[in-house]
Amino acid sequence: MRLVLQLVARLLLIVALCLGAATVWATFDAYRSVDRATAASAQRVAQALQALYWRELLLRSSRAREHLLPVPEWRTLDTMKQISPGVCVEFQPAAAFEKPLCGQSEGLGKTPPRWFASIVPTFLGSHAEVVRPVSPRAAAAGTVVATPDAAAAISLAWDYILNVIDVALLMAAAIALLASLAIAHTLAPARTIVTALQRMARGHYRTKLPRFRSMELAMIGGAVGELGTRLEEATEQRAALTRRLIEIRDDERRALARELHDEFGQNLAAILAFANTIETSAKQKSDNVVAQDARMISQATHHLMASLRDALKRLRNPLPEELGLEASLVNLVDSWRSQSAARPTIQLDLRGDLTDISGPAATTAYRVAQECLTNALRHSSAREISLRVERRAGEDDALLIRVEDDGGGDAERVAQSAGFGLTGIRERVAAAGGSLSILPARGGLSVAATIPLAA
C-alpha cells in the first residue's frame, strides 16, 4: 500500500475518532444543558416571586402573612418569559387545582429516533427537579419547584447533536481533504527519489535530484546522490580492474599458446616421426606386432596434435583482431558446422553495420558468442541453435549478442552457476559496461549480452 494512502487512512481514522468523541461530548452537554436551564428557570421565577411577595407585604400590611401567598398575580406573561422551553414551574404551597406553569415545548427540536430516546437516559440518567425558596429570609413565602420535561430534554439534545454533527462533519471533511492534499504534496518528492533509485538500479548512477524543501527529504536526496557517486566510482574501478585482469589473462593465454606450440608441438612432431620410422622399419622386418604398435602411437599422436590445434585456436589472439568481428563470427560458426554433420543446426543472423566494430568491444562480442555456442553444443541436447548479433544504432549505440537453443535447461540454475566460462563472459561484459541476462526460451535457454560501443 502506498505511503500516501496509509497516512490518509490513519488521518481519516483520527478524524473519525475525534468526531465520535465530539458526538459523545455534544450528547452529554446537550442533555445536561436541560438541568442548567431548569435551575436557571427556577432561580429567575423565584426572584420574580420574591419581588411580588415583598410588594404585597408592603401594600397589604394589614393582612396576615399566611394570606399573602399564593400570590395570584404570579401567573403572568412576564413570569412565562422567565421559564426556559421544556421546563415546568409550580409554586408551593400550591392552590387547589393549580397547574404548573410550563415553557413552550411544542415543536422544540426534531423528534429523536427511538434508539436515541432509550439509550441516552440509560447512560446519562434522569433529570432532577430544582427547588428554590421565594425569599431566603422568609421561609413562609413558599418555594418554586422547576421540573424538566424528559421528552423535551431528549428532543433538545437530539437537535443540538444534529447541529453539532453537521458542523463537525463539514470540518472533518475539510480537514481530511486539506490534510490529504498536504500529505500528497509533501510526499511527492518521494516519487522522484524512487525514480532515481530505479535509474541507479539500471546502471545510471549519476542521477541529479532537485533540492527538496523538507530537511528529511533533502537528507535522503543527498544520501542517494552520494550513493550514486560512490557506486559509479566503484563500478569504474571494478571495470578498470577487470579490464586489467583480462589483459593479464590474455597475455598468459598467448604465452601459454607459445609454450604449447614450441614445446608440445615439437615433441609431438618428434614422437610422430619416431613412430613412423619404427613402423617403416618393422614392416621391412615383417614384424607386424611392432608395426601395429607404432601405428597406434601415430594415431594417438595425431589425436593429441588435433586437440593441441583446437586449444591453440582458443588461446591465440582473438580472430576479431585479425579478421574483424563479422568475418570472425562467420568463421566461428563454420568451424563448428564442419566438425560433424550430426551436430545441431547453427543459424547465424547478423544485423546492422559491424565493419567498424573493433577493439575490446569486438573481442568481448566474439568471446561471448564463442562461449555460448560452446556451452550450447557441449552441455545440451539442442537440435537448433541461433546466434544473432545486432548493432543498435542511434543514441544508445550498442551491440546485442543473443544465443538461443532448444536443448532444455534450467535458466535459473544456469544463471547462478559459477562455472569458469560464464564467469569469464560476465567479467568481460561488465568490464565493457554492458549487461548479461540468462532467460528461458522456447524449449531451451536464451543468453543475451548488450555491449555499449561507446565504452
Image (cartoon, helix red, strand yellow):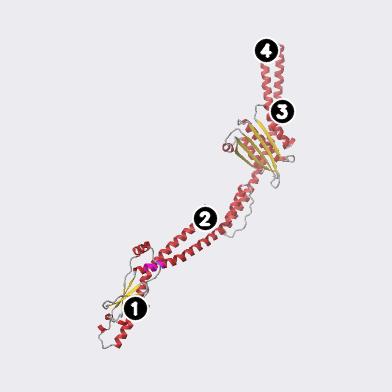
Disc 1 target residue: 45
Across and down, in percent, residue 224 comes to: 60, 52
Quadrant placement of the C terminus: top right
Structural crowding at the residue carrying mark 4, measured as other residues with C-alpha within 10 Å and reported as few (<14), some (14–19) or many (≥20): few
Which of pointers 2 and 1 indicates the residue nearer the eye? 1
Q: Is residue 317 visible?
A: no
Q: Which residue corresponds to the image point at 34% horizontal and 70% vertical from the top-left?
A: 149
> First in sequence: mark 1 or mark 4?
1
Q: Are marks 3 and 2 in contact (CB under 8 Å)?
A: no
Look at the magenta stretch and give its main secondary structure: helix
For the magenta stretch, what is the residue range?
Answer: 153-159
Residue 65: image tag: none
Kindly report the distance in space between the C-alpha atoms of the residues bearing marks 1 and 4.
150 Å
Q: Which residue corresponds to the image point at 71% horizontal and 28% vertical from the top-left?
A: 261
> First in sequence: mark 3 or mark 2?
2
Which of pointers 2 and 4 indicates the residue nearer the eye? 2
Which of pointers 1 and 4 indicates the residue nearer the eye? 1
Disc 3 target residue: 262
Kindly identify the amino acid type of the residue bearing the numbered disc 1: Val
Q: Secondary structure at mark 3?
A: helix
Kindly identify the amino acid type of the residue bearing the numbered disc 4: Asn
Disc 4 target residue: 288
Q: Is residue 35 left or right of residue 250?
A: left
